[in-house]
Image (cartoon, rainbow, N blue to C red):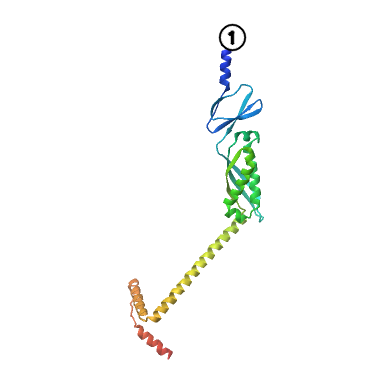
Amino acid sequence: MFLFILFVIAIVIILTSIRVVKEYERAVIFRLGRVVGAKGPGIFFLWPIIDSMIKVNLRLITVEIQPQDVITKDNVTIKISAVVYFKVVDPVKSVVQVNNYYYAIEQLAQTTLRSICGQAELDKLLSEREKINAEIQEILDKHSDSWGVKVTLVELKQIDLPQDMQRAMARQAEAERDRRAKIISAEGEYQAAQKLREAAEIISQYPQAIQLRYLQTLNEIASKNNTTTILPIPLDLLQNIGNKGQS
């Protein structure tokens, strides 16, 4: 009977000592309060009573940074939100060096976002997002390295502008479109004038060209307005009348 009880106790101890962690997890092992390392994935055994463990997720984690009030370098008040992507690369450090790495990353990202965006002008924030993202990501990764965490990507999610600033930017964009339209129209007029000058030079060198153009114009008028009666007048006659008027 005594042997049976010992056998049952041994079975219970073995069963309670078995631990299994998944492929994307690691188990940080503490023995009598001291870290002995990380184990996993798969199955392993812990010494009853003297061993304990904490599971750590190694998958990529996404943290959404809520909109932060930021005053830019040119004194414009805006709200900026962002998304931070990170993962644990050292399970032991993520447990020993920081109480809650998720919360620490979130708070660090908020303060860094306000600091970096507050040092930039509004135009830079709107036009150089990739540069701002890289700068924030570099700072976060530098500080979180001692926590065993790797920040892989930071993206500015949304920049909310004041209503008056939105209207001012809309007016500026409209004025810019009008300016481009006027420039394009002026360039078209300039090119047309150049072509007319070239045509006039050719006609002055070859008088027959104006006669051909005259006949072509008559043909176009006749084809478009069938009810119109056209009486062609020789160009020589018009030229003679003009010469008599000048004399």
Residue drawn at x 43%, y 75% as measured from the top left:
196
Q: Measured along the vertical axis of the image, is residue 193 above or below residue 156?
A: below
Name the image quarter holding residue 11: top right
- Residue 106 vertical position relative to residue 173 in the rendered view, above or below: above
Q: Residue furthest front?
A: 36
In the rendered view of the protein, which quadrant contains the C terminus?
bottom left
Reply above or below: 41 against 158: above
Q: Residue 193 versus residue 216: which sits nearer the camera? A: 193
Q: Residue 48, percent across and down?
A: 61, 21
Number of residues whose C-alpha sits closer than 10 Å to that of mark 1, classed few (under 14), some (14–19) or many (20 or more): few
Quarter that holds the N terminus: top right
Q: Is residue 25 left or right of residue 217?
A: right
Q: Quadrant of residue 224?
A: bottom left
Picture coordinates of residue 154 (x, y %)?
A: 58, 45
Q: Nearer the viewer, residue 104 or 36?
A: 36
In this rendering, position of residue 35 left or right of residue 174: right
Residue 169, quarter of picture: bottom right
Residue 215 lies left or right of residue 82; in this view the side is left
Q: Which residue is mark 1?
A: 2
Of helix, strand and loop, which one carries label 1?
helix
With respect to residue 124, does 235 lie above or below? below
* Residue at the farthest bottom position: 247
Q: Residue 209 in the image: x percent, y percent? A: 36, 79
At 61% from the left edge and 49% from the top edge, which residue is drawn?
A: 135
Callout 1, which amino acid? Phe
Residue found at x 60% / y 34%: 91
In the rendered structure, the answer to whether residue 13 lies left or right of residue 225 reads right
Residue 236 image offset from top left, x and y in percent: 35, 85
Q: Closest to the observer: 240 or 61?
A: 61
